[in-house]
């Protein structure tokens, strides 16, 4: 029935340990050179690269209303 937690199988100790580590990860985090570089890459560098590519290619291609043989380049 719903609500009863009578599990015939024991919990896997490795999964319990992993879950505890996952829940308490913020308690053991330390800023190191490696974590700073990874954070910079994901928070600043990658979005800046995507923004630069979007800005430089804005309006160059029009994918709507094209037929076979038409060029997608608009410049």
Image (cartoon, rainbow, N blue to C red):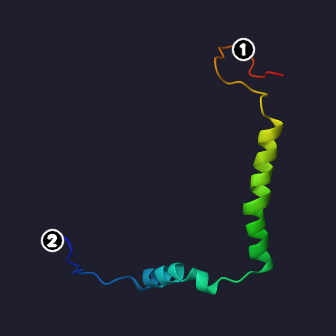
Point 48% across, 84% down: residue: 20
**In the rendered image of this protein, does residue 34 appear above or below residue 68?**
below
Q: Quadrant of the N terminus?
A: bottom left
Question: Is 71 placed left or right of 27 in the picture?
Answer: right
- Image spot of residue 64 (x, y percent): 64, 21
- Comparing 58 with 21, the one in front is 58
Point 21% across, 74% down: residue: 3
Point 75% across, 18% down: residue: 71
Image quadrant where residue 62 sits: top right
Image quadrant where residue 8 sits: bottom left
Query: Dot 1 corresponds to which residue?
Result: 70
- Image spot of residue 60 (x, y percent): 79, 28
- Image spot of residue 54 (x, y percent): 77, 40
Q: CA distance from mark 2 to mark 1?
A: 63 Å
Say what secondary structure mark 1 lies in. loop
* Of callouts 2 and 1, the N-terminal one: 2
Query: Dot 2 corresponds to which residue?
Result: 1
Q: Quadrant of the C terminus?
A: top right
**In the rendered image of this protein, does residue 72 appear above or below residue 34?**
above
**In the rendered image of this protein, does residue 44 appear above or below residue 2?**
above
Point 76% across, 55% down: residue: 46
**Residue 53 got which mark?**
none
- Image spot of residue 17 (x, y percent): 48, 85
Question: Is 24 placed left or right of 52 in the picture?
Answer: left
- Comparing 75 with 34, the one in front is 75
């Amino acid at each position: 029935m719903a609500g009863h937690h009578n599990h015939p199988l024991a919990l896997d100790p490795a999964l319990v340990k992993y879950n505890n580590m996952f829940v308490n990860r913020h308690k053991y985090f330390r800023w190191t050179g490696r974590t700073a570089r990874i954070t910079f890459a994901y928070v600043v560098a990658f979005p800046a690269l995507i923004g630069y590519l979007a800005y430089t290619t804005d309006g160059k291609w029009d994918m709507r209303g094209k037929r076979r043989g038409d060029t997608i380049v608009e410049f």
